[in-house]
Amino acid sequence: MTAKSSEYINLLPGFQAKSGALFEAYLNECSASKYDPNDLRIIAPEKPIELSSQTNMEISMHPNPADNETVITFTSQKEPFSLTVTDIAGRMMYEITGQPDNAGNLQEISLNTSLFPNGIYACLLKSGRHLKAEKLLVQH
């Protein structure tokens, strides 16, 4: 795979590479970018995030593909949660945070997708150190 970007490439939660895969990034200076070879950094969370396949955290959307609206349903954990919907470029389209009443309760959020362009979106549910990601397709 070759990925090119004018400013950054964001690997979202859910990105996977097969065991033994090699990931390399080559940065070339160019007059059209904000690249500064003296300002390279790696951003990593202070505490590791656990993908929630080991937990009972679930998220689903219906309908999916969505036209004008989809209902996002998820199971709450004990910790406060955030639900973020991003487009394929990583731009935030929707975000909500909350505090669950009780762990294990089913939460429903109605999301208006009528203004979203056709495409694939990532729905990211974060609660404490756990993260669950699902794809949403918007098709008008």
Image (cartoon, rainbow, N blue to C red):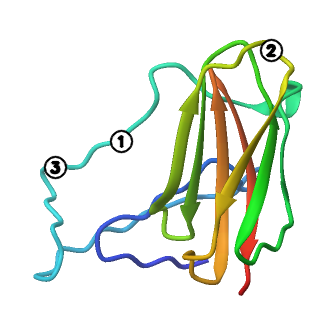
Q: CA distance from mark 3 to mark 1?
A: 10 Å
Q: Residue at x 72, y 14 (%)?
A: 101
Residue 103 numbered tag:
2
Q: Position of residue 92 (x, y in %)?
A: 47, 57
Image: 64 above or below 4: above
Residue 49 appears left or right of 104? left
Q: Position of residue 106 (x, y in %)?
A: 85, 30
Residue 39 numbered tag:
3
Q: Earlier in the sequence, mark 3 or mark 2?
A: 3
Total of numbered circles in the picture? 3
Q: CA distance from mark 3 to mark 2?
A: 42 Å
The amino acid sitting under disc 1 is Ile
Dot 1 crowding, Cα within 10 Å, few <14, some 14–19, many 20+:
few
Closest to the observer, 10 or 59: 59
The amino acid sitting under disc 2 is Ala
Res 138 visible: yes
Q: Residue at x 18, y 65 (%)?
A: 35
Question: Which residue is labeled 1 in the image?
Answer: 42
